[in-house]
Amino acid sequence: MKLKTKISLLLYSSLLLLFAAIFYNTLVDLRNASAKSAESQALATAKVVEAGLTAHMISGTMDQRDTFMNQVTSLQNMKQLWLVRSSKVSHQYGKGPFAEDARDGIDKSVLESGESVIESKGAIFEDATVRVSVPYKAISNTKLDCLSCHDVKAGDTLGVISIEMQTNDLKALSYRNIIVGTVLLLILFGAMVYFLHKQILIYFDRFDAMGKCARDVHNGDLNARIPDELSKDHDARALNALMDKFQTSVKTIEDNLSGIIQLDTTDDPLQALRDGSGRLNDMNLFTQTLRRDTNTDEAYEHIAYHFSDQFKIDDINLISCNPLSQETKIVYEKRAILCDAQSGCRAARTGEIVDSSKPDGICPKMIIPNEQYVCVPYSINSGSTFVVSMVSDKKNALNSVRANTHIVDETLHAIRGEIAHHQLSEENQKLQRIDPLSGLYTKNFLIERMYRIVKESKRTAIPYGVMMINVDDFTTINTVFGEKVGDETIRIIGQTLLDSLRESDTIVRLSGDEFVVLLYDCDPMHVNNVGEKIRSLFANKKLKANESGFIKTVRIGTAIFPQQHKDIAQCVAYARLAMNEAKSEGGNLSVKFHTRLLESN
């Protein structure tokens, strides 16, 4: 039901009840006024009758009273007039020639109590009568002495005068008043209805239209407006203008957001904007988090945690691929990765999502075929493709990922700059830590590695062999054969070291022809054997110079960390002392550090 209809029914019913109450109250007042008028007339007539009877008694003409009574009875509106004789008068004078006994209980009540009784009969729209019964009492004074004739006391009731009068004339007057009042009320009622309809209730049509407009907007219909026939009001026009601005603003925001994120296609565009702006804000905060990360490992861990928290998936793997070199690396794995992505990632190669739930989504790289997985690739730049791989052993665990892969794309798009920044920083750090000539680590990496080894040794006490290596008389190579031959010699030494050592060992080109080797988890015997192996291999290599060749040897000094010193940097210094000892003995020799070398230096 419309608001206008509700308000109209309420107002009209209230007015109707009000006018009905006024009408009824007017009728009652007129009825009471008529009754009061009749009562006054009856009481006055009773006094006249009382005075006339007294006069007849004084003059001794009571036998002629009927003439008087008939004249009184013939008065206008007089219905009945009768007299009642009390028992005391009847006992003294007899009942008399007229029937003057009490006719009803009212007569008897007045005789007994000596009090007047007034009674009205008849409803509002019926003929009404007024009954008045007054006592005729004995008096004794100088003019009239009832006690002289009657055997009674002063104040005793001698009889009752009862009168019944009609109120027809008064009623007719009331009818006229009722008709006039009714006409006036109807005129007033009509005027008020017209005023309400034309001046007041018209606003409720606008209120209904405004309410409908608000409900439609709430339900997602931004085209809702107040109809033209109701928008002539200033407030309605202002609301329509406001809705125009609101719709334009929403459309502008929607277009701007659509260029960044995919908005949900719901019936409520405002809810879609709220959800979209919320995701955008989350991505902005996430981007700031990655911006504060100090290295790629920390950034990758945050990325994995972000997707794990968003999709409630525990196993998140991150894969970085270089489309140019076809190099693929597992940059983050929550658990042991279940696919051979390092030999080539299908998602990165095709640039398409690999989904185990689709017929063409089976990846041959997956080691355990029954696992559920969704791999989403994203191109960071021409040299990097980033793959977010989400894995689960539960069939429906990845449904939320499948339904919202666009969120993964949007997030990667938002953080691509941060990923590229961290990857570039890693490459720069790698360049700073890798010697371009030999392919070995530089002094910067050695410092970082020694710092970590010292920290780890406090927990594990794992021993390291420390080696210092120099080429015997290296300066003559550059002098005699030139720098190109010297550089080639450095490359050959670097390759010799790589061929002779394990992946767990650290090989560093410290400067020039000076190299440092950190042998992981080894005893003194192993250190000596490795030193001899390197010396022997290099001594058997023939170096080329122009059209001829030559042989060069190396000198090696060794020490043991942490047995010989708890500071690995000091162990490097010990290895240098041993290497210098090998030089003083002619070179092509591996010498172990001994405390006597400290005494000689």
Image (cartoon, helix red, strand yellow):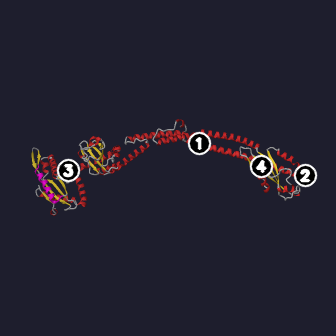
Q: Which residue is mark 4?
A: 131
Q: Nearer the viewer, residue 120 or 436?
A: 120
- Give percent across and percent down for residue 497: 16, 52
At label 3, the amino acid type is Leu
In the image, which disc is placed on residue 9? 1
- Secondary element type, mark 3: loop
Chain-order first, disc 1 or disc 4? 1
Q: Quadrant of residue 126?
A: top right
Q: Which residues are magenta?
A: 522-541
At label 2, the amino acid type is Gly
Can you see residue 248? yes
Alpha carbons under labels 3 and 1: distance apart: 95 Å
Kindly indicate whether the residue at mark 1 contacts the one at mark 3 (C-beta within 8 angstroms).
no
Q: Which residue is mark 2?
A: 60
Alpha carbons under labels 2 and 4: distance apart: 30 Å
In the image, which disc is placed on residue 499? none
Tell me the quarter of the image containing the N terminus.
top right
- Give percent across and percent down for residue 414: 34, 45
Alpha carbons under labels 2 and 1: distance apart: 75 Å
Q: Which residue is mark 3?
A: 440
Q: What secondary structure predominates along the stretch shown in magenta?
A: helix
Chain-order first, disc 2 or disc 4? 2
At label 4, the amino acid type is Arg
